[in-house]
């Protein structure tokens, strides 16, 4: 399978993630790269992130609000100047029904992003149901936003992005090459999600700095491994889908 690299920098992009921090893990450095070239980057978070803790006594309302604040700070670290939208579905309960598709396709029609990015729902062995649901929701909503007879109740013009990029994908066919600055922005954005240090970044409250260094190395090693496929130092991998197909 041939692998293409680097879309032309889009004027705008909408990244859709299941939870706060998913977008940064999946495509944070690519978004930072495009933002540095003045692309307007929008983030859409499908769920409220209310189950994102291992503490059984946690106040989940406090967690929801904390994670929204963290997500907004992460957007700043990426250089994202567009909207940060929270769809507000309950964590763990996301589905891709008609009502949700209407909500997300309306957002696509309003923001009119050149590129849409989201989870790959076909990735095997994927554990979290919200990641699968967010992937299906992204794909279904691109089709619904694209074709004029879907959701005519929106009263909006239809909109077809030029590219759909799926991250954490089963079979990558597209790489975005990255430099240190883009990866630094990705790591800085991830490190704003302090509520997720224990659950997704293996950083505990007693960290003397060494766990944070290891986390940074993990992100750099992942992008290095991806980049080696095309002989470049660092990259993020995607499944490219032509929204006209
Ligand atoms: Zn997630």
Image (cartoon, helix red, strand yellow):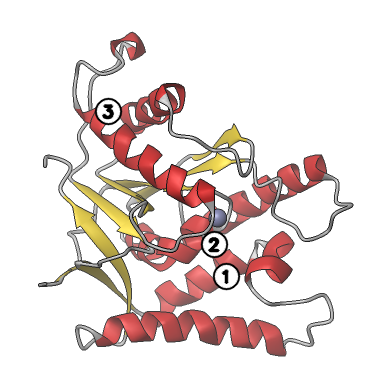
Up the image or down, 78 lies above or below 179; here it is above
Which mark, by number, is residue 188?
Answer: 1
Q: Secondary structure at mark 1?
A: helix
Q: Residues within 10 Å of mark 2 (few under 14, many from 20)?
A: many
Q: Position of residue 224 (x, y in %)?
A: 37, 86
Label 1 vs label 3: CA separation?
Answer: 33 Å
Instruction: Give me the disc on residue 145.
Output: 3
Q: Nearer the viewer, residue 45 or 199?
A: 199
Q: Residue at x 79, y 44 (%)?
A: 60
Disc 1, ligand 1: is the CB inside 8 Å? no
Looking at the image, do the residues carrying marks 2 and 1 touch, with CB atoms under 8 Å apart? yes
In the shown orientation, is residue 66 left or right of residue 223? right
- Mark closer to the chain start, 1 or 3: 3
Left or right? Give the position of 112 relative to 52: left
Location of mark 2 (residue): 77
Name which of mark 2 and mark 1 comes first in the sequence: 2
């Amino acid at each position: 399978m041939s692998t293409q690299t680097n879309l032309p920098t889009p004027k705008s992009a909408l990244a859709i993630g299941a939870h706060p921090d998913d977008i940064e893990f999946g495509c944070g450095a690519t978004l930072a790269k495009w933002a540095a070239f003045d692309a307007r980057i929008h983030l859409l978070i499908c769920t409220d992130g209310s189950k994102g803790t291992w503490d059984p006594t946690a106040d989940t309302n406090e967690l929801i609000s904390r994670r929204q604040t963290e997500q907004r700070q992460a957007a700043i670290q990426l250089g994202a100047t567009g909207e940060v939208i929270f769809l507000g579905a309950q964590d763990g309960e996301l589905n891709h029904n008609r009502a949700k598709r209407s909500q997300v396709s309306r957002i696509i029609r309003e923001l009119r992003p050149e590129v849409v990015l989201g989870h790959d729902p076909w990735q095997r062995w994927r554990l979290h149901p919200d990641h699968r649901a967010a992937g299906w929701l992204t794909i279904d909503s691109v089709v619904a936003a694209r074709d004029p007879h879907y959701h005519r109740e929106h009263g909006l013009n239809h909109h077809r992005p030029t590219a759909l990029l799926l991250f954490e994908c089963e079979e990558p066919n597209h790489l975005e090459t990255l430099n240190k600055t883009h990866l630094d922005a990705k790591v800085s954005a991830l490190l704003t999600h302090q509520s997720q240090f224990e659950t997704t970044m293996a950083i505990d409250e007693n960290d003397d700095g060494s766990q944070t260094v290891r986390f940074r190395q993990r992100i750099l090693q992942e992008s290095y491994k991806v980049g080696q496929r095309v002989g470049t130092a660092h990259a993020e991998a995607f499944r490219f889908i032509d929204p006209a197909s």
